[in-house]
Image (spheres, rainbow, N blue to C red):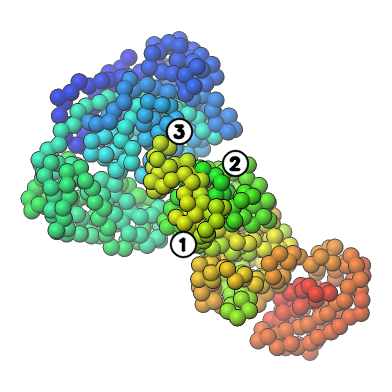
Amino acid sequence: MKKIILAALALTIMNNGQAQIFTDDFEGYALGSYIGPQSSSWRTWSATGEGTSEDVQTTNVQASSGTQSIYFQSTSTGGPQDVVLDFGQMYSSGIFTYQSDFFVNSGKTAYFNFQGNNTIGGLYALDVYMDNGSVSFQSGGQVQLSTAYPQNTWFTLKVECNLTTKIWSVSIDGVSVGNWINSVNTVRYLDLYPISNSQFFVDDVSFDHSNYTLSTLNAAAAGLNMGGQIASQNTTPSVVIVNAGSTVITSFDVSLVYNGSTYTENITGANLASLASTTINFSTVVLAAGTNTATATVSNVNGTTDDVASDNVSQIILNPIVPAAGKMVVGEEGTGTWCGWCPRGAVFMDRFEKDYDQFWAGIAVHNGTNDPMVYGPYDSGMNFSSFPSSKVDRVGVGIDPSTMGTPFFNRLQIAPTAWIEVGATFDPVTRELKVSGNFDFQSAASNQYKAAFVITEDGLSGTTSGWAQSNYYSGGANGVMGGYELLSNPVPAAQMVYDHVARTIVPSFGGFAGSFPATVSAGTSHAVNRTIYLPGNWNVDSLHIIVMLIAPNGQIDNAGKATVSEAITNGYVVGVDAGSNLGVTEIKQIDATFEMYPNPATTNVAMTFNLKENSDVNLRVIDMSGKIIASRDYSSMIGASHINFNSSNLNSGVYMVEVTINDEKITRRLVIQ
């Protein structure tokens, strides 16, 4: 075994208690053997799987020290390995320090957690997710800290938990990467579990505990949050100040240095009791691309210098994601009022909306026979098998909403095929909402791309039992979850307000098949229209319009989002008509693709289509001011049909060609040269 000497802690430690130290470098186990049967400290999650596939074996493929380590690799859904290190007792005060070396294969994941009580699975104090070079530390249902880690090489990860002051900090290879105020401040077990796509090695595991005694006057900086992770975001940074001393703090200064600028807040008239904390917000900051260090410093505590200088600084390294131009990512969440775990989905959907509104369109798709917010076609289209669940841009299988971060950032960096602006007109008397999605194509496409229109509503509530939310977080036994731990199970309907609720998706879940011409050139714009008559119980001021561009593989390529008022300000652009009214689908009579050519045209335009039944056909040509230039009625048509229109009398410009088949319309944009 190797003895690991603890580095100096960032907080004052009084070593007047007995330290309990554990180290394991896995050199004392037979190569290829399971560690559970040979150790009194290592066990499995079930406590009965030692020596089975739930246990972990030693390997000499990689080692941080010596020749051996332990190796975790998951099945497609995670596990079956699930290995627990018993800390020997519950720690609820003082400073607990965990350290180990990790080697995560490139493009793969790793995961571990700290259990917060004596019952395995009863309380999660910390979840740590490593994925393709990014590691996030989560507690209480939210990400507390995110940073980078080196892939395909060994690195040392240390977590220092001051359970007395609630300040937790992390260092990687000896460099501090941040701290935060943790929501759960008890630790009992370490759990190593390979989630989906995991391949990682662990070596040189240790933990230690020391008592902690408060100094007289001490303000500690913790939890520096720059308010975003995306370059070009306007954010409001904040830092948490903790009274880590015994004297009430009445005044202090906090400075933030970032990207060459210094921001200062002078706090007076405070009344911060011992072990209490407060959050200080700074003025708006624009996140800069590239690697920058942000440093928050607390000083001038009660008009003097406090007792402990080492905890006055909180520092994080930022390298924000650079989004692709014009990109918006769609998150579709499966939820239901019957689902006791679904408050977790609501918490993360709210968080994404708050943190990434400029780049994120969130849609809550409700499920269940008694849930009054279910829209059947959307629920059927998502086809979630578990709840809560989510998909980001409809990529892959359903994932837990708490893990949407990585796919969101991945998709945000992929250049979209088209930029999308949402326009609209609205008649408050008839409640006719005419929506336009104007697609500015950045690369070539085809008619295999489709447009779909979604309406979501915020602020929904009701009084009947179906509006009550089942809540397994009630009482806090399953951890902190955005305040749901303080509410009953179920949460009464009178206390519930639902946001991001999917009201409709039209003309279908997969989009409108006639959205675009057979060949779409880069640099061209194509508008698609949809008319929706809003029910009287929909609050227009609480609606969002989301227009999606669905790729041929069924994934969402890009989206545009706007409130109704924002869409009206953007302006309505006349384009291809994707139908009207809720529930209207594509033209029923057409059995094949409607084609119009040539386009651009000069003297003649031909239209071909195949009709499944006898149909009355009408043709109108409309200029961009809305004036009808030409109108033709054709006798009943069936089967392979052909229309020739003489366009020689039209001036050069853009026109809309509207073909009505019985009572349904197809609209195409026509350019006359």
Residue 513 lies in what quarter of the image?
bottom right
Residue at the image point whose x is 59% and y is 41% from the top = 386
Q: Residues within 10 Å of mark 3 (few under 14, many from 20)?
A: many
Q: Quadrant of the N terminus?
A: top left
Residue 118 lies in what quarter of the image?
top left
Q: Nearer the viewer, residue 599 or 367?
A: 367
Amino acid type assigned to the residue bearing label 3 in the image: Tyr
Looking at the image, is 417 positioned above or below residue 207?
Answer: below
Residue that mark 2 sits on: 386
First in sequence: mark 2 or mark 3?
A: 3
The reply to whether residue 149 is visible in this rendering is no
Amino acid type assigned to the residue bearing label 1 in the image: Gln
Residue that mark 1 sits on: 358
The reply to whether residue 585 is visible in this rendering is yes
Residue at the image point whose x is 47% and y is 49% from the top = 491
Q: Which mark is residue 111?
A: 3
Q: Are marks 2 and 1 in contact (CB under 8 Å)?
A: no
Q: Nearer the viewer, residue 77 or 232?
A: 77
Label 3: element kind: strand
Q: Nearer the viewer, residue 369 or 216?
A: 369
Q: Position of residue 6 (x, y in %)?
A: 24, 26
